Amino acid sequence: IQEPEEKKIALELLETEQAYVSRLHLLDQVFYTELMKEAKNGKTVPEEVVKMIFSNISSIYQFHAKFFLPELQKRMEDWSCNPRIGDVIQKLAPFLKMYGEYVKNFDKAVELITFWSEKSPPFQELIADIQKRKVCANLTLQHHMLEPVQRIPRYELLLKDYVRKLPPESPDRDDAEKALEMIFMVAKHSNAAIAEMERLQNLWAVYQRLGLEDDIVDPSNELIKEGPIQKISTRNNSTSEKYLFLFNNMLLYCVPKVIQVGAEFQVHLRINVDGMKVRQ
């Protein structure tokens, strides 16, 4: 007898979850635990650094190993008399917001690994030593750390597929559709969190170049464009270099500072964009 399509997808979800939990185990119980132990002995890097690299991986591991995987296993064992996974995924979805923190921290974590590997040979050696073990399958720590970043999109794809293959009269239809909606919102939430964080970081960098003038620093501003312009003086036919920052609400007319201590530019003029017209 051919297994129903939706059961195949549910089994794929279970199998990938088992593999995922062993990857989380490797990150939390092996890499994090052993690096932390050496850091405490003062042999490699400060403890703080190890904590910053692994962010909230322990919570993510505990959640999947102790809650989601066992619930999913139970569902698949009872499949013949109760074919459903939608309710379990609904319980999972709100907890996936924990990933926001991990995903946001990911680039920083990779930078820290690179920086401290160069700075502390014992740190690099310990990582290399763990990477040589069979459980690492010849992959680097950075590679394993990418797995949680890719997990939510994977849930979304599997669940979309599952909902598509469900027969209209399936007892799991309502729950599965609701679960998909919830997962979709979480995925959107974590992408939006990353985009917002990048926007604020870029904005802050611009403010620093402008010398952090109080009345200009506003987190809701958006930088649209920046660049140098030549100002032509009609009086003595000379040109001088100026620099423009165009925000959603103002245009800053700046002069590059000769001595760049603290700021790169001096703001000479603020022009409100209300009533501005653009001409080719």
Image (tube, rainbow, N blue to C red):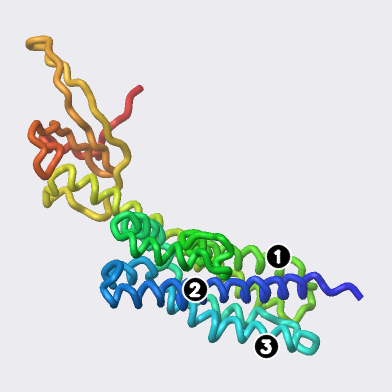
Q: From the viewer's side, name the closer residue of 232 and 277.
A: 232
Q: Residue at x 35, y 64 (%)?
A: 123
Crowding near pointer 1: few (<14 within 10 Å), some, many (20+)? some
Which x, y percent locates residue 149? 50, 63
Disc with the residue nearer the chain's start (1 vs 3): 3
Instruction: Name, please, the residue furthest toward the right.
Output: 1
In this view, 60 is above or below 152? below
Q: Quadrant of the C terminus?
A: top left
On the rendered structure, is 164 left or right of 50?
right
Read off the residue under disc 1: 161
Tell me where residue 34 sits by quadrant. bottom left
Residue wearing tag 3: 74
Residue type of the residue flagged with mark 1: Asp
Disc 2: which residue: 96
Q: CA distance from mark 1 to mark 3?
A: 21 Å
For the residue carrying disc 3, how many other residues have a C-alpha within 10 Å: few (<14), some (14-19), or many (20+)?
A: few
Left or right: 159, with 111 as reference point = right
Q: Earlier in the sequence, mark 1 or mark 2?
A: 2
Please state the horizontal and vertical placement of residue 7, each as a whole percent of the image: 77, 75
Residue 233 x/y as whole percent: 12, 15
Specify whether residue 197 is in view: no
Secondary structure beneath dot 1 equals helix
Whether residue 161 is situated above or below residue 36 in the rendered picture: above
Q: In the image, which disc is placed on residue 113?
A: none
